[in-house]
Structures are given as C-alpha cells and as structure tokens.
Amino acid sequence: MNDSRTRTILVALGAAAFLALATTGCDPDVNQANTTPESKSFGFSGDSLTVKSNSADLHLIASDVDDLEVERRVSGTKIGGEIDAGWQFEGGVLTLSVNCDGVSVNCKATYTVKVPRKVAVTAEYGNSDVRLSNLGGTALHLEGRDGTVQGDGISATSVSAVTRNGDIDLDLTSVPARVDVQSQDGNVRLGLPASAYAVRTAAKKGDVTVDVANDSKSSHSVNVRTRHGDIAIGEGVSS
C-alpha cells in the first residue's frame, strides 16, 4: 500500500473515531464546553459603543441599564483542549470572541449584550448571525462578512449596513433620516413606518419591490444595493 493511501485511510479512521467519541462524550481527552450561561458587567459611559466579534453570534438589546450587561453561552466539543472564549471592554470597544481552532464539533458561542438606551451602536462581525432588539440612538452601523442580520424595533436616526453574504432584515419603528444597506449576496428586507422616502435601489440579479411612498425630494433617504438577492421595502415587510 502506498504512503498517500495509507495517510488517507488513517485520517478517515481518525476522523470517524473522533466523531464517535464526541457524540458519546466517553473519552476523557474530549472536552465538552459548558453550555451554562456566564454573565459579566462592564462599566460604561458615553453615547457610542462598538461591538466586535469575529465568529461568535450576537444579540444586541437596548435596555434600561447603566453599564454593559453581557451573557455568554459556549457550546461544542473539542479534542485535546478547551474551547476558548473571551470578552474585553476597552476604549469604547467591546470585543467578543470564540476560538474553535483545532479539531472540534459544533463549536460556537453566543453573546447577548444589553446596552443603555439611546446609545449609538456599531457592530463589526465576521462569520456571525446578528440579532438586534430595540436599538435607538443617533446611529446604528453594521459591517460584516458572512451571516444573517435581523433587527426589530429599530429607532436609530441613521442606519447603515454593509455585508458580503447573508440576508438583512430590519424593522424600523420610527422614520429614519437615512438608511444605507449594501449586500453582495443576500436578500434585503426593510420594514419602514408610513412616510415618504427618497428611495434608490440597485440589484444586479434579483427582484425589487418598493411599497412605500417614493418622493425624490423627501428628506428621508433609503438606499439599498445588492448584487445577487431580492430587495423588499415596505410598511411591515420585515418580520
């Protein structure tokens, strides 16, 4: 038997053995992360916050709190070590992380962050799903690579989102001054309060539906662009 075939068989056997062990949880060298939530509070002052996450999922909630209240749930199985997760707040930036390097199964982390009301929020994420609840303030800015974004009860004056892959679904509860959304590959859905908007859309491949009053002279502008994906803008379109 040649060396390459031997290596292939060994790798396949090793992977199968690990999956069996991870499923049964019987091996002492396999670490099952604790899914019990952990909580931490970070002192906060100011009117703006940046949240950074490379691959952990995020749920950002505006709440009646003075500081940042963070809950973390880590899950998954890793062989030969622990799943590392970290949280740090410095200079107005909350950094949230999970390290799934190595051999692991279903490794993930979800962070729920309660932020004071009326704080302008910027979220920078990589391979993450992002959920937003009741965020207001002067601005909401989202910048991501892969993952879906769903926002409910958004009352920020200015809303912007830039993503590569993944759907964006935002439900606004107050008339914004400006909305800018750009996605390479993904559907964009905006639910807007009844008003007239200066709407501009561009979709290279996808359907475009606009069901709000479109007035080019309106001071409320909505700009949505996507390469591959549908665009739907209307009253109560988001869900």
Image: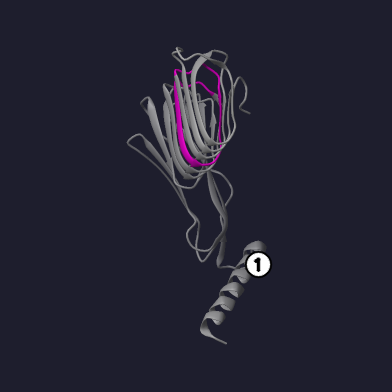
Residue 97 percent location from the top left of the image: 45, 47
- Residue at the location (59% across, 77% down)? 9
- Is residue 92 or residue 2 the one in the foreground? 2
Q: How many marks?
A: 1
- Toward the right, the furthest residue is 24
- Residue at the location (67% across, 64% down)? 24
Residue 175 falls within the magenta-colored stretch = yes
Q: Secondary structure at mark 1?
A: helix
- Is residue 75 or residue 235 the one in the foreground? 235
- Is residue 164 or residue 6 the one in the foreground? 164
Residue 201 falls within the magenta-colored stretch = no
- Residue at the location (56% across, 20% down)? 192
Residue 190 percent location from the top left of the image: 56, 26
Image quarter where the N terminus lies is bottom right
- Toward the front, the furthest residue is 204
Give the residues in magenta: 154-177
Q: Is residue 140 visible?
A: yes
